[in-house]
């Protein structure tokens, strides 16, 4: 087993989580949620713009799709779904959290594009430097996804519960 780069682990995982814990401790949850929603919309919109040229190139290109193309599409659709659902969350909060806004075609579209993104990420083993994501872990992830989806569907069919408040 490889040894952990302690400095990298500290900078990438420990400190950001400690920073969040401090911010969360000294801030009320509601304004923090609003601020983070705004940050997500802004940052993921930036990702959409950054990945738009490769997506447009994929659309017009005649060559077969490669794994990097599929990964780029996954990143774009992840960004798009996040922008849509976080924007919808902001609108929902501004309108007083009406229940009817929870089950709309806009929410369904955001979830649909997120599903496409996840499929693209799993369909692109070795898309970056023949390493990321590793084929073995993609296979494990695909099995986890299928089994979890099947379990959730069985639970829904047996109980009728959708998980929507």
Image (cartoon, rainbow, N blue to C red):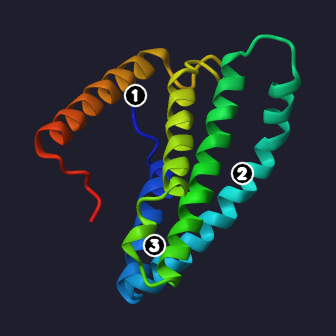
Between label 2 and label 1, give the one nearer the viewer: 2
Q: Nearest the camera: 148 or 98? A: 98
> Are the residues flagged by discs 2 and 3 in contact, CB closer than 8 Å?
no
Q: Gap between marks 3 and 1, in whole Å?
A: 28 Å
Between label 2 and label 3, give the one nearer the viewer: 2
- Report how many numbered discs are placed on residues in the image: 3
Q: Reading the chain from its start, which is encountered first: label 2 or label 1?
A: 1
User: Residue at (50%, 20%) from the top-left corner?
Assistant: 134
User: Residue at (41%, 77%) from the top-left corner?
Assistant: 98
Instruction: Assign the C terminus to one quadrant of the image.
Output: bottom left
Q: Name the residue under label 2.
A: 47
Q: Nearest the camera: 91 or 76? A: 91
Instruction: Assign the N terminus to one quadrant of the image.
Output: top left
Between label 3 and label 1, give the one nearer the viewer: 3
Label placed on residue 2: 1
User: Residue at (39%, 88%) from the top-left corner?
Assistant: 28
Q: Reading the chain from its start, which is encountered first: label 2 or label 3?
A: 3
> Are the residues flagged by discs 3 and 1 in contact, CB closer than 8 Å?
no
Res. 83 in view? yes
Q: Picture coordinates of residue 92 (x, y %)?
A: 49, 75
């Amino acid at each position: 087993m490889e040894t952990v780069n302690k400095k990298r682990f500290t900078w990438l995982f420990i400190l950001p989580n400690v920073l969040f814990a401090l911010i969360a401790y000294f801030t009320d949850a509601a304004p923090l949620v609003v601020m983070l929603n705004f940050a997500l919309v802004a940052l993921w919109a930036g990702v959409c713009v950054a990945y738009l040229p490769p997506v447009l190139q994929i659309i017009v290109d005649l060559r077969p799709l490669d794994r990097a193309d599929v990964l780029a599409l996954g990143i774009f659709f992840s960004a798009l779904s996040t922008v849509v659902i976080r924007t919808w969350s902001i609108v929902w909060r501004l309108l007083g959290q009406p229940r009817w806004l929870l089950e709309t075609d806009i929410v369904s579209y955001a979830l649909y594009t997120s599903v496409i993104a996840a499929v693209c990420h799993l369909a692109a083993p070795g898309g970056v430097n023949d390493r990321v994501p590793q084929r073995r872990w993609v296979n494990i992830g695909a099995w986890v996804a299928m089994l979890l989806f099947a379990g959730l569907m069985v639970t829904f069919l047996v109980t009728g519960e959708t998980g929507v408040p």
